[in-house]
Each structure stands twice: as C-alpha cells, then as structure tokens.
Amino acid sequence: MAFHNVSFNPRKFHKSQIKFHLYLIPISLFMMLPILFILNNAFKPFTELFAYPPKFFVRKPTLENFRMLFNFSVESGIPMTRFLFNSIVVALLVVFLSVLFSLMTAFAISKFSFKGKEKIFKINTMALMFVPIAVAIPRFLIIVKLGIFNTLWAHVLPLLAMPIGLFLVKQFIDQVPNELIEAARVDGASNWYIFFKVIVPLVKPAIVTVAFLAFQSSWGNIQSSTNFVDLETLKTLPFYLNTLVDGSGNIVASAGMNAAAQLLMFLPNFVLFILLQSRIMESMTHSGIK
Amino acid sequence: MESKKSIPRKLNERYQNSKLSKIINNPFTFIVPYLIMFSIFILLPTIISAGLAFTDFNTIQKPSFVGFQNFINLLTNDSVFLKSALANTLKYALIVGPIGYFLSFFLAWSLGQVTKRARVLYTVLIYSPSITGGIMMTVVWQVFFSGDEAGYLNNLLLKIGFTKEPIIFLQNTNLLFPIIILIAIWSSAGVGFLAMIAGVLNVDRTLYEAAAIDGIKNRWQEVFYITIPMMKPQMLFGAVMAFVNAFNVSSVASALSGGNPPPQYAGWMILDHANDFGFARYEMGYASAITIVLFIVAFLFNRISYRLFSEKD
C-alpha cells in the first residue's frame, strides 16, 4: 500500500522508528552533559568537587554553594539580590516593550500599504546578521549623548529593536486573512482596535516566541553592564556572575560557587523554554525567508 | 462580528473623524517606535563605525580623518589580524556554519520521524545548549578539559591508557582551536534548528503519499525531492542564523585558556581583535575598521546563503 510508506510525523510508536532513537538518544545525552554537570556540581559539597578521581554525579547534595554565592556578594558590598532585582526589572521592560514594538511594526508592514514598507522589511531582514558586540563603541557614544549612561535604560533601550522579533511576528501576521481585518473595518473598528482585538489574540504563538527570545537576550546580556553602566548598583546579574568567574582567578577554589551561579543564569531560560516550547514551535512554522 | 456590539457606533464615528485619531491610527504611527530604536541602536552605530573607520580616534581628542590608512595598516601591517583574527574567523565560520547547519537539519529531519512526545523531549535537550550562552558555559568546558589528572577527559584518557601524562588541552595552541569548534558545534542547534523542525513538520503529508505512488523509493529521495524543496524558506532562515552565530563569537579562547590574549593568539577572532584595539588600547578608528571588515565578511556569507536557498533568483 502506498500509505504504508509515509512514516513522517507518526502518531504511534512503531519499531521502524527504533533506528532514529538509536542515534537521537546518545546525541541528546551528549547535548545535555554540560547541563547535568552544572546541576550536579552546583549541589556538590567541597570534598566531592575535588575528589580524585573526579565524580560526575553528586553523592551528598548540599546547598553550601548557593549559601557561599549569596555570602560572597555580601562581602563585596552589594548584595546579589540587588543585581538580581536589576536583571528582573530590565528583563520585564525589554520583554514587554520589544514585543509591543515588534507587534505594532509587523502589523503595519503586513496589513497596510504605505511607501517604503518593503524596503524597511528588507533592511530588517538584513539586520538579522547584525553583530551587537561589534558596535559597542558607537553605541557607547550614543548612550552618553542620549544622557542614559549610568541608568537602567542603558540596559533596556539597545535591546528594544529586535530584528528577529519583527521578522518572526511579521511572517506570522501574514497568515492572518485580510478578510478578517476588512470585516472589522467595515464594522467601524479603528486600526488600534483591530490591533488589540483581532491581531494580538491571533498571533499569540509569535508573541510567546518573541517574548522568549527577548528574555533570553536580556537575561544573558553582559555588554550593557560592561560598557554602558559604571555604577556597581546598576549592573545586572550576568555581569556580577562573570566577575565571580574572572575575579576569583583560581578556577578550582570557586568551582562550586561558579556552578551555582551558572545554574541561576541557565534555569529561568530553560524552564521558560519547556513551558513555552509548543507555542514557540507553532510560530516557527512561518519563520522561513522567502 | 464581536466588534459590532462592543463599540458604540456614534461615539466611534466621531472619534474616527477627529484629527488626533487620524494621526494615531496612521500606519506610520505603528512603526515609529521600532523605527526610532532601530535607527538609534542598530543603523546609526553601524554608520558611525563606518565613519570612524576612516579616522584616527583615541576617544579623548576629536577624530581626525586619515582616509584608508586604517584599512591599509590592517591588511598590510597587522600580522595578528591576518594570520590569527581573520584566518580564525573564516575557518571558524566555514567549519561551524556548514556543520552546525547540516547537523541541525539532520536532527530536525530525524525528529520529524518520531512520535510527538519523544520529539518534544529531544527538542528540549538538543536546544538546551543554545539557551546557556557560550561564554558562561566555558566554565564547564574548563573543568572538562582541565590540564591535570582531575580533568574529566584527562582522567578518562589516563584510565584507558591513551596517554601517560595528562594533556594540557587549553594552553596547547594546536588543541585550543579544535576545542572551540567542538563547543560551537555543540551549541549550534539554536533558533535555526527550531525553524527547521517546524519546516519539516509543515510539509504536506499528501505530498509524501503522492510521491510514494509516483515511485519514490527511499528516504533519501524523499528528503531531496520533497522535504528540502518544500522547506526552502526555513532552510534559508537556518543558514542565516548559522552564520550569525558563527560571526558573533568572541573571547571564548581567552575564557578557556585563562589568558587575554590566549597563547600565540590561538582561537583569536575578529571581534576579539576589535575589542582589544577598542577597549584595551583606545584606538577606536582602527577598531572600527576591524568591525567593518567583519560586517563585510558577514554580508558576503549572507549573500552566499541567499544564492543557495532563496526561492527568488
């Protein structure tokens, strides 16, 4: 039978799929090794961290590393919670504003006709290649000129225009039928009304995806703390954790604390991805460049 | 429609005719915030970089115009740039870009052949390295490749008798670069990988059925005649993303080897070179010229990706 040959996206397990699992399992295990490693090290007591021969898995889990991490920050003057707080505020602002800006722009480019919209989208698609670290110097000059040097805005504003965000949302809004918008317009709805009541509910998967990517870029962003902010109290968590890694010099002495710090950076992203992955995958269907 | 009930007509008409409403409902109003941010933090910095590249600028005195001098120095006098930064970046992009890309496609395709539950689990695991971000993860690899017998890899190699002395991986200039490549490939399944999974799943099922009737014999033919042509847009997106990641890399070598610059500039990238001149020596003009070279190289790779995968010619 012809249908028998279609094995793609199967609904049920069949033994013909075993061959795929045979290499997918070892590859996934290899991929998650470093994460397992951090997870184990973060809870290892001092003696296990430097046991010889090295042990991969933790035997007697302890919270000692986390306690050390929090105490260390107290010694350096500024409590770690301060950096954590900064990071959360910055991340919330970045997520909210960059999602809103991407949505508004994507809506306009996808559903209105005005001069230059193709050009704007083309430039944006080219900017997918943009390398933020490469323009740290001019960005610094601009931030000083804008008067936002040494403010929380120096963390937020540079991240708000997210080419990949606009790109993904626009591709997704393209799928919303124009008739729906026409119908709403005939009913007397304004553009903003259409935007909030028609578009936003329909493109939720794309919103979730951009929110996730925005969070990721903000949570791990180190450039703004290094270059755009001088005041210690205004720096963010990744910068602080990085100084632990660099500053302690001796890798061995701070291995446990580092692992705890790494876990703290990694976990929010990871949990968010697990929670949101089905929506993220849905929006990725329309991610292609035509 | 729902909107009929929720907007009182009269009020809405009066509002729609007002001048203010015309302005705030103008399509342009929707794009202004993004456009401003894009111009200030992406477009303008790139233009300033291009401008500064033709100047001598130490951040204290005003930049003075020097023409192509920075580029001439860069391409004729700066052996670290030519032999290490540029060569390493190109090598890195040419190895990590294609390998990461094909690996992503291969994994995405494989995930299309298993049931949904298994697929979700694999996706989370395979994508997880890209969540962590490169530099932070170097701590893990430092311990893994540690140069004494307490390092995981050395311990293993000693145990199986592969070597008698622990190998000093991270200070060895011949080994540092391959290790960086390995780490990069490990974390190469990023957004492009997710797009490719979606692309694989989005191929119309009936196409496979039709193809089976038309005499497609094996999986290879299926992949080349149906899957790849049907997901070309995602393939292009994946290719662009693969090269973005490849050119975005910096300071991995320093972080791994624990020295800046790393021994004999092993694993030294264009961005490292730019940061070195920009933030350690304050030669902003020269540093800008370096970043412009990076942008040109990245742009060329982008063009190649479009040539290969774009549906338009």
Image: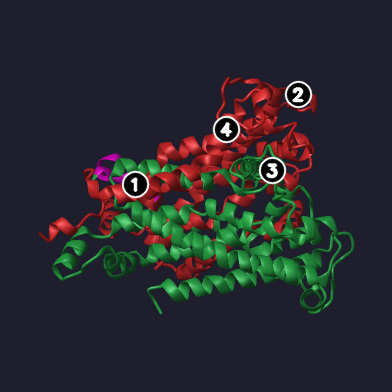
Chain colours: A red, B green
Q: Nearer the viewer, residue A111 or A18?
A: A18
| Magenta segment includes B4 | yes
Query: Picture coordinates of residue B257 (x, y %)?
Result: 74, 50
Q: Of discs 3 and 2, which sits in the foreground?
A: 3
Query: Crowdedness of circle 4 by 10 Å Cα count: few (<14), some, many (20+)?
Result: some
Q: Nearer the viewer, residue B253 or A172?
A: B253
Q: Amino acid at mark 1?
A: His
Provide the secondary structure element on which disc 3 rests. loop
Q: Are marks 2 and 1 on the same chain?
A: yes
Q: The magenta stretch spans which residues? A: B2-16
Provide the secondary structure element on which disc 4 rests. loop
Q: Of discs 4 and 2, which sits in the foreground?
A: 4
Contact check, label 3 and label 2, Cβ < 8 Å: no
Q: CA distance from mark 3 to mark 2?
A: 30 Å
Q: CA distance from mark 2 to mark 1?
A: 48 Å
Host chain of mark 1: A
Is A56 left or right of A103, judged from the image as shown? right
Query: Picture coordinates of residue A194 (x, y %)?
Result: 35, 50
**Which circle marks residue B254 in the picture?**
none
Name which quarter of the figure residue A257 lies in: top right
Mark closer to the chain start, 1 or 4? 1
Host chain of mark 2: A
Q: CA distance from mark 3 to mark 1?
A: 32 Å
Q: Which residue is mark 1?
A: A21
In this view of the protein, can residue A235 be seen by the observer?
A: no
Query: Crowdedness of circle 2 by 10 Å Cα count: few (<14), some, many (20+)?
Result: few
Q: Which residue is mark 3?
A: B146
Q: Amino acid at mark 2?
A: Val
As drawn, B195 above or below B224: above
Contact check, label 4 and label 3, Cβ < 8 Å: no
As drawn, B263 above or below A273: below
Q: Which residue is mark 4?
A: A56
